[in-house]
Image: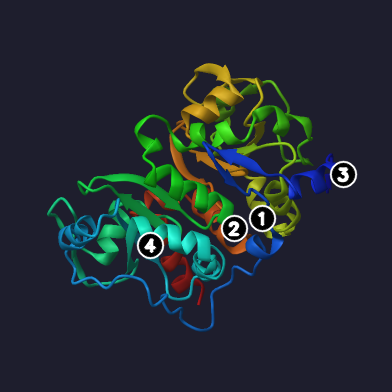
Amino acid sequence: MYKKTITLSILLLLLSAKTLFAANAVDTTPADTDIIFDDSQLEEELIYPDWFKLTFGDLRDDLDEANKAGKKGIITYFGQKRCAYCEQFFKTSLADIDIKNYLQKHYDLIAFDIWGIDDVIDTDGKQYTERELSIHYKTNFTPSLVFYDTDGTPVFRLRGFYPPYKFRAALQYVAEEFYKGETFSEYFARANPGEYFLQGGLTERDFFLPPPYDLKAARDNGKPTAVFFEQGNCHTCDLLHSAPLSKELSIQEIEKMNVIQLNMWANTPIITPEGEKTTAKEWARSLNIFYAPSILFFDSEGEEIIRVDSVTYFYRLWGVLDYVNQEGYKHSKDYQSWRLRQRKINK
């Protein structure tokens, strides 16, 4: 069971909140229609939007065309044919006419299947298959996007599906080259004053360890550690707890771990898995946490295994929990390979 510590009036305030990015207004309203969906595997294969750019397999040529057209670079999209998160990305962010126009104005978008076998030459001249390229860029979750600048340098990456307002902010962050002076978490924090997210309470759960938060000492029991970075007045945090984390299968896996909950804007004292004394706010900043909720998983040696920092529902969350608890990272070169292997075993 869990106890809600956020009032209806605060939630309604969040749903109507608007913030500013630099000199441009960006709507940060988290609409349920954008982020609530069934994340089980699709029955029908996805079809790419017809405006995606066709490639002959050499990203250097694609970049050259984009540069000649006066664009800021190219974006590579990594997806799966039956990915519910990819479908939601197409139906929300890419269906938004303003986002679509802004993206097409500044970038050419080139699609790859993370299981594809076609050859691809990256902008540095190295050759991969689509599958190998997806592993190279650590696209643990689909859809993933890699942004290249006009020189062909990968400058930013998004892994997973985000609400349209967050994706729109990421587009502006890269297109207007804010990445040259600050991280995306710092950029986004300028538009979202931390004080607002300290006002609301966090969702309390029995499996969260109480303070003081000494993550180095927690390693002594040999369990992996899961750190939940959340914030007050957080609709997406509420959805995580009321949906995927309300299921018994998720709780069974979570209870095999040391589990810590932190407000990413608070000055809560902590000791990191590596033994550094800091605060939740400073640690979140150093880890470039820009989405709430984000869950970071550490092994018993204090090394980060994987992080979930995008919209996540039951099948994806349970898959990651299983991957961590079974130490799948020791047996497979990437998360997606582990999940495919488990599906075949369980058939």
Q: Nearer the viewer, mark 4 or mark 3?
A: 4
Other-residue count near label 3 (Cα within 10 Å), few / some / many at <14 / 14–19 / ≥20: few
Sequence-wise, the earlier of marks 1 and 3 is 3
Drawn side of residue 180 relative to residue 129, left or right: right
Residue that label 2 marks: 318
Amino acid type at circle 3 is: Ser
Amino acid type at circle 1 is: Ser
Between residues 56 and 212, which one lies in front from this camera angle? 56
Sequence-wise, the earlier of marks 2 and 3 is 3
Mark 1 touching mark 2, by CB under 8 A?
yes
Other-residue count near label 1 (Cα within 10 Å), few / some / many at <14 / 14–19 / ≥20: some
Residue that label 1 marks: 250
Residue that label 4 marks: 104
Q: Secondary structure at mark 3?
A: helix
In space, the residues marked 1 and 2 are separated at their CA atoms by 6 Å
Q: Looking at the image, is 195 positioned above or below residue 15? A: above
Residue that label 3 marks: 9
Q: Nearer the viewer, mark 1 or mark 3?
A: 3
User: Residue 4 in the image: x percent, y percent?
Assistant: 84, 44
Residue 142 visible in the snapshot: no
User: Residue 286 in the image: x percent, y percent?
Assistant: 47, 27
Sequence-wise, the earlier of marks 1 and 2 is 1
User: Residue 88 in the image: x percent, y percent?
Assistant: 56, 67
In space, the residues marked 4 and 3 are separated at their CA atoms by 39 Å
Identity of the residue drawn at 36% across and 39% down? 177
Q: Secondary structure at mark 1?
A: helix
In which image quadrant can residue 189 be found?
Answer: top right
Between residues 293 and 320, which one lies in front from this camera angle? 293
Amino acid type at circle 2 is: Trp
Sequence-wise, the earlier of marks 4 and 1 is 4
Other-residue count near label 2 (Cα within 10 Å), few / some / many at <14 / 14–19 / ≥20: many
Residue 318 visible in the snapshot: yes
